[in-house]
Image (cartoon, grey):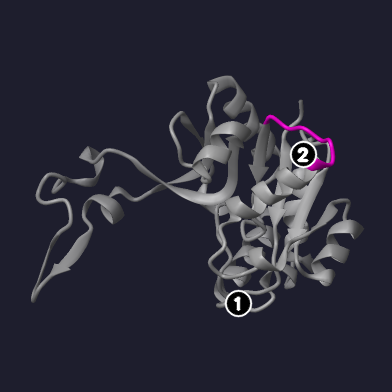
Amino acid sequence: MKPLCVIPARMGSQRLKRKNVLPLAGVPMIVHTIKAALSSGIFERVIVSTEDDTIGDIARRHGATAHPRPPALAGDLVSATDVCLEVYEARKSAGEEAGSLVCLQPTSPLRTGDDVARAYERFVEAGADFLVSVTPIDPHYFHWALQQNGSWWEMSFGSKYLLERPLLPPRYRPNGAIKIGRIDPLLNLRNFFGPKLAAYEMPEERSIHVATQTDLAFAEYLLLHSGRTS
């Protein structure tokens, strides 16, 4: 049974207006995620959940299926997980089954089809209930974190990690590019960070999350200087 692929793509955005359809290396940004999903070769179809006709038209022109998102799920505080599960429930009502769900956010346009395929392979081989893509972070950013306590500042984790960088344990950040969950645990938990969580590591240059105009410009620079167009 092939996994269900959902790309949650609304038109509204607080920081970067209409970001999912802004041009990136000559095409609307969302097209890069659609192409990655299709080229992975692991999906029966790629579904774009959107409340916007323009995004729906772009999705169909580039080989995806447009799913009309209910207006109640188009707000700023609605989780991508809820959007994905609404698509699953609609497909299930139409007689389509899936054992797992893959969420590909269009704000991570530099992930590749190979990333998607290898992440899913890792998910299956690990016998995981969930998988998220991750990127290594400088351990100083995490272990040497500071916080304000009244008038003064203090180390968030005390003195335990006051070590030189080579002695600090590695840490990773979820980069938002790929999230996978088995349907039953996902329905119960309603997020992708539950028990039996696996990870797929991606390099920083494919892990950018586009939230600002600067992010978009950097993503275009990385695409064009890597020789990729998608």
The crowd level at tag 1 (other Cα within 10 Å; few <14, some 14-19, many 20+) is some
Q: Position of residue 222 (x, y in %)?
A: 62, 60
Q: Is residue 103 above or below residue 72?
A: above
The residue drawn where x is 75% and y is 70% is: 21
The residue drawn where x is 85% and y is 51% is: 64
Specify the quadrant of the image occupied by residue 17: bottom right
Q: Is residue 35 above or below residue 29?
A: above
Q: Which residue is mark 2?
A: 92
Check disc 1 and report its element: helix, strand or loop.
loop
Q: What is the count of numbered marks?
A: 2
| Image side of residue 79 versus residue 162, left or right | right
| Image side of residue 143 versus residue 133, left or right | left
Label 2 amino acid? Lys
- Whether residues under marks 1 and 2 lie with C-beta atoms below 8 angstroms apart, the answer is no
- Quadrant where the C terminus is found in the figure: bottom right
Given residues 41 and 98, the one toward you in this image is 98
Compare marks 1 and 2 and give the one earlier in the sequence: 1
The residue drawn where x is 58% and y is 40% is: 187
| Image side of residue 53 versus residue 21, left or right | right
Label 1 amino acid? Leu
- Quadrant where the N terminus is found in the figure: top right
Magenta region includes residue 48: no
Q: Write the start and end of the magenta stretch as one range.
A: 92-99
Given residues 40 and 55, the one toward you in this image is 55
* Residue 208: numbered disc: none
Evaluate whether residue 93 shows in this view. Answer: yes
Q: Which residue is mark 1?
A: 16
Q: Position of residue 83 (x, y in %)?
A: 65, 55
The residue drawn where x is 60% and y is 55% is: 80
Given residues 71 and 11, the one toward you in this image is 71
